[in-house]
Image: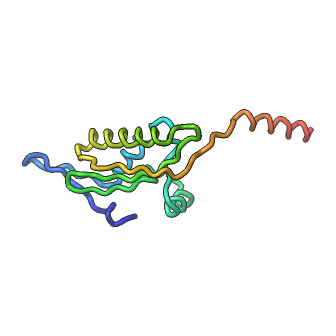
Amino acid sequence: MDNENQVITDIQLNDSGKVVFAPDVIATIANLAAAEVEGVSGLGGGFADSITGIFGGKKSYTKGVRVEVGTEEVAVDLSINVKYGCKIQDVSNNVQTEVKNAIEMMTGLRVVEVNVFVQSVTFEEEKAEKPEKKKVEESRVK
């Protein structure tokens, strides 16, 4: 994990105390908001995230998200996979808007930037082909 993601940010609330956010909380909010955008097939990560996913076994909600936090501001970098046939510019703009709105609404922190990196274009496999192939193979066996 990056050293900058180890820092915990806080927001002062009057004189009665403060609220503290771990960067992973902000990254999770960004991940979930981006995943809900039409045209996003998933969030990608680098090589280290791929290895962690293979051996870790549990789903990471911070995969493909890097967060830099200050005391009142946040900057987010997202790596996304876009579905083939979708307008990449529209999908990226929608991701930026949704992530910014979600973080600001849930944490009260000001989002100064949301950088979107399109890592890949994904193709949906036709689900109808698989059962037909199975039937053909079964008939050959009999």
Residue at horizontal 37 percent and vertical 65 percent from the top: 2
Quadrant housing the C terminus:
top right
Quadrant housing the N terminus:
bottom left
Residue 11: x and y, percent?
Answer: 18, 50
Residue at horizontal 72 percent and vertical 33 percent from the top: 128
Residue 115: x and y, percent?
Answer: 38, 51
The correct choice, above or below, for 93 with respect to 51 in the image is above
Left or right, 66 with respect to 134, comes to: left
Residue at horizontal 44 percent and vertical 43 percent from the top: 92
The correct choice, above or below, for 8 with respect to 39 in the image is below
Left or right, 130 with respect to 138, comes to: left
Residue at horizontal 42 percent and vertical 49 percent from the top: 116
Left or right, 33 with respect to 107, comes to: right
Left or right, 116 with respect to 47, comes to: left
* The furthest residue to the left: 15
22 or 2, which lies in front?
A: 2
9 or 83, which lies in front?
A: 83
Residue 32: x and y, percent?
Answer: 41, 42
Residue 86: x and y, percent?
Answer: 54, 37
